Amino acid sequence: MRIGELAERFDLAPHVLRHWEAMGLLAPTARVNGRRRYTRDHLIRVMTIIRAKAAGMSLEQIREILTVSGQAERQALLQRHHAELERRLHEISASKALIEHLMQCTADDFTHCPDYRRIAETAAGPQNLHKDGCMI
């Protein structure tokens, strides 16, 4: 398939795929009459890049994972990225709990609501509080 066809399947502009090619993430199978040609394998590769970007990985990190030699090295890279995703999920969950409380809170000033303060302090974690209860 041509670059435009591949890009269209993912609602991307063709220049995005050209950029990924320049970054070493994607390489056309062949050029026919000077035009890039892609296969079904490229569909999987583009989907992989899109998912990795959605997970917060940079193009450099994605390239590293796609080009690393050896499963042990790839596993080590993926474990680091997994740990970062877990940290982000924890932060998102804490933010979600605050928002859910605020949607139901009837306090005039929610920052003085005891339940909100408890949730906020729990989300901040004890490592971020001084002994007097003030945020660092």
Image: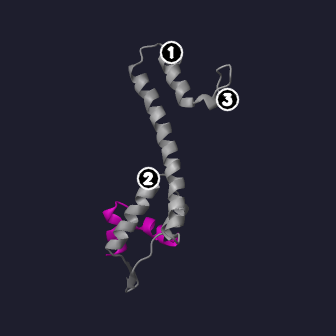
How far from the left and from the top, in percent, is residue 13? 39, 63
Mark 3 or mark 2: whose residue is earlier in sequence:
2
For the residue labelled by badge 3, is the local secondary structure a helix, a strand or a loop? loop
Q: Amino acid at mark 3?
A: Ile
- Tell me if label 1 and label 3 are in contact, CB under 8 Å: no
Mark number, residue 54: 2
- The residue shown at (34%, 68%) is 43
Q: Answer whether residue 109 is magenta in the image.
A: no
| Tag 3 residue | 136
Q: Position of residue 102 (x, y in %)?
A: 43, 23
Name the disc covering residue 114, or none.
1
Quarter of the figure that contains the N terminus: bottom left
Front one among 83 and 1: 83
Report the magenta residues as a range: 1-24
Q: Rounded to the nearest whole Å, what is the CA distance between mark 1 and mark 3?
A: 20 Å
- Between marks 1 and 2 in the image, the one whose residue lies nearer the viewer: 1
Q: Is residue 68 among what the camera can see?
A: yes
